[in-house]
Amino acid sequence: MRTQTNPNDKEADMKEFRGRTAVITGAASGIGLELARRAAAEGMNLVLADIEATKLDAAAASLGIDAGRILAQRTDVSREDEVKALADAAFARFGGVHLLCNNAGVGLTRVSWELSTADWNWVLGVDLWSVIHGIQHFVPRMLQQAEGGHLVNTSSVAGLLSTPGMAAYNVAKHGVVTLSETLYGELLAARAKVGVSVLCPAWVPTAIHESGRNRQERFGEASPAAGLSAAYEQRMASAVKSGRLTAADMANEVFAAVMEERFYVIPHRKINNAIQLRMDDIMNLRNPTQLP
Ligand SMILES: NC(=O)c1ccc[n+]([C@@H]2O[C@H](COP(=O)([O-])OP(=O)(O)OC[C@H]3O[C@@H](n4cnc5c(N)ncnc54)[C@H](O)[C@@H]3O)[C@@H](O)[C@H]2O)c1
């Protein structure tokens, strides 16, 4: 396992993936499933977590690897006790965790003033608190490992932009970017053999536009989208479906970044112009430019 470039620590551990352990959340579908496939192909032990138990078991079986190398544990990543239980299970079973992919996520498209408190709690819980809990319960133990490790937190280009209709998602994903940047600096300051990367994809054809399927009962149902919210919802769904890069491409980008010790993983390079435009708006005190 390679770790973050640390100018203070030239001895940073640079071992291989083979025989190491990866924990992947949201592993039953989309990007998480492809991360699991890639980790399996690299010869890693796997701890797969997802809220959809049946799909998770099917995903684990589909990898076709020895039962001794894999653990699938139903986990609601928005709940701290369940993330702690996942960490306990992973360390107990494999004795260490070397790659943690905080990847599970949900999306909800509504104009800001139509998002209920339950909507906010759901999206922030799954998309932001999950990463916070992952850091709380995995990082202290990863820091104790002689061989080091690496976290990959899945944000989105929504963590770098402010696209209308996606307020809760944008807030959560901006949170994941700044949380990851902060962690990066802290790990360097601590001379840690643990690194971190943040994954910021644009549109990838997965089941993210059907996230409501996983909304926990405690949050109730979202009210039906109408008017502008419905238009944004439709646009988001067709953008996801038309995404050119695949979930497998995301997994390749992630593993390349971990090996290169690269923090920012932004596979859709065409989005750079939009990011630059936002930065220019800020630097020039210009009102936010709206893209078509
Ligand atoms: N697909 C895209 O266009 C896109 C773009 C940018 C970022 N992302 C991010 O990529 C990540 C993976 O999403 P995806 O596109 O593969 O979507 P997906 O819906 O195919 O996969 C998400 C997985 O997360 C799981 N999940 C949902 N709620 C959960 C919970 N409370 N606890 C545990 N697991 C839960 C789902 O069951 C599902 O298996 C998400 O964080 C998403 O925000 C996706």
Image (cartoon, rainbow, N blue to C red):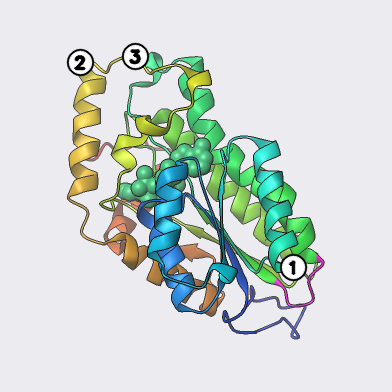
Note whether 118 is above or below 160 in the view shown.
above
Magenta stretch mostly in which secondary structure? Answer: loop
Taking 11 as reference, is 48 left or right? left
Q: Where's residue 9, x and y in %?
A: 77, 80
Q: Give the residue at mark 1.
A: 95
Q: Give the residue at mark 3.
A: 223
Q: Give the residue at mark 2.
A: 227
Check if mark 3's residue and mark 2's residue have beta carbons within 8 Å.
Answer: no
Q: Which of marks 3 and 1 is nearer the N terminus?
A: 1
Q: Where's residue 133, x and y in %?
A: 67, 43
Check if mark 1's residue and mark 2's residue have beta carbons within 8 Å.
Answer: no
Q: Which residue lies furthest to the front in this view?
A: 67
The quadrant in which the N terminus is found is: bottom right
Three-letter amino acid code at the position of disc 3: Ser
Locate residue 77: give its quadrant. Answer: top right
Tell which of 237 and 63 is nearer to you.
63
Q: Quadrant of ligand 1?
A: top left
> Residue at image x 22%, y 53%?
243
Locate residue 98: give its quadrant. Answer: bottom right
**In front: label 3 or label 1:** 1
> Residue at image x 45%, y 50%?
56
Note whether 104 is above or below 8 in the view shown.
above
Crowd band around label 2 with a 10 angstrom C-alpha radius: few (<14), some (14–19), many (20+): few
Marks 3 and 1 sit apart, C-alpha to C-alpha, by 45 Å
Which SS class for mark 3?
A: loop
> Residue at image x 30%, y 44%?
207
Q: Which of marks 1 and 2 is nearer the N terminus?
A: 1
